[in-house]
Image (tube, rainbow, N blue to C red):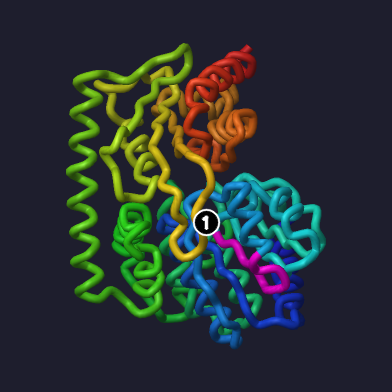
Amino acid sequence: MSADKFMGDLSKACSRLMEWDRRDVLLVFHDDADGISSGAVAYEALRRKGFNVKLVCIEKLMDQVIGFIHEKYAGNVIMYVDIGSPHADKISKANAGRSLTIILDHHDPVPASDPLVYNLNPEFYGMEGERDASGSVVTYFFAKALDPSNIDLSSIALIGVHEIPGEITGLNLKAREDAEKSGRSMDTKKMFRLLQILGPVGYYNNGPFLGVKACLEGLSDDIVKFVEELEDRRKKANRRMLAILYRRGLNKTRYIQWFDTYNVYRGMGTKVVGTFCSFLSFQGRLVDPDKYILGFMTMPNEIPGLMELKGSWVKLSMRAPRKLRDRIEAGSYPGISEIVVNVAHEVGGIGDGHKYAASAVIPTGAKEEFLEIANSLIKAKIS
């Protein structure tokens, strides 16, 4: 498999899109900087082709969310960007041949079984989603396959690339070359930082949609001021959370050190717990370098502009300190997505992510069960 095969399959999906008899699209995007820039690229590319696009930002694709989307929007085009690949099997089952569904993602994928579900992910083509392609870059090459004149969207795609550490390689490098050719430039690093605040912290305050607007129209003074207010809220919450952890310490099991955020991040999107876990992974005085880091946060039942969730849910995020990350890289410890995805499924939730960072949504009462099963899985993998 190769990048050329990937580009060919993108073109096939574009042809199918242009042949579809409806022009209404539900565009589902993730709430981080990669997801927002993916959403902006897809929105503009579709708009230029005359599609009517409804934007929906989702933190986590739960079973009931997938079912709701494919029931309410049956027959339309449904597009997932920077989200969806790990759940392509469930999306296929819910879709049941009713809607043209296009998934543009770089997270660890599973195959789709519905012929109308195009699960376009570089992982299927010999590339690594954690190294060679951000979600925004995958979305950009779809936009370019749809119309080569969309090369001007490459600069927006580079925003999401900043979530991938190290040297730019693979499709990310090709997107950067396109951005240089297009002559359109922006401060992508600054935009990445702002979107990482707008989306997660401002999730329930229209933040993701303001992020899409900023990608396409530029930063306004009002958006910059709003970001500053959100960042101030998050910094204060982070300081409170750190004070709690320094006072109480992290809870510890054999392989996991964990904490609950209580109501510290109330009103913010749940991705903030993942960002805080990443921050903790570098705090040598506070964390055990030999244990996975896990944070829990209560999840509100509202998905803005889409639906109210049934039940009571908790978001969890998992990261690894540097020492443990090296063991994961060496293969002596299991990758985080392997743990989170499997255990979340066991307790009635849903998870996705990468080898070094993953998250899930589980029922509120399943935290202890999750920890117990996760420790058992880690022990078995190490053995």
Residue at point 46%, 65% (across, down): 305
Residue at point 66%, 48% (across, down): 87
Quadrant of res 159: bottom left
| Residue at the disc numbered 1 | 134
**Number of numbered discs:** 1
Measured along the vertical axis of the image, is residue 283 above or below residue 165?
above
The reply to whether the magenta stretch includes residue 73 is: yes
Q: Residues within 10 Å of mark 1 (few under 14, many from 20)?
A: many
Measured along the vertical axis of the image, is residue 7 above or below residue 93?
below
Measured along the vertical axis of the image, is residue 298 above or below residue 251?
below
- Percent position of residue 23, x then y: 65, 82
- Percent position of residue 40, x then y: 47, 71
- Percent position of residue 19, x then y: 76, 82
In this rendering, does residue 189 appear at all? no
In this rendering, does residue 254 appear at all? yes
In this rendering, position of residue 291 left or right of residue 89: left
* Mark 1 element type: loop
Which region is colored magenta? 72-81
The reply to whether the magenta stretch includes residue 264 is: no
Residue at point 52%, 75% (across, down): 43
Quadrant of res 227: bottom left
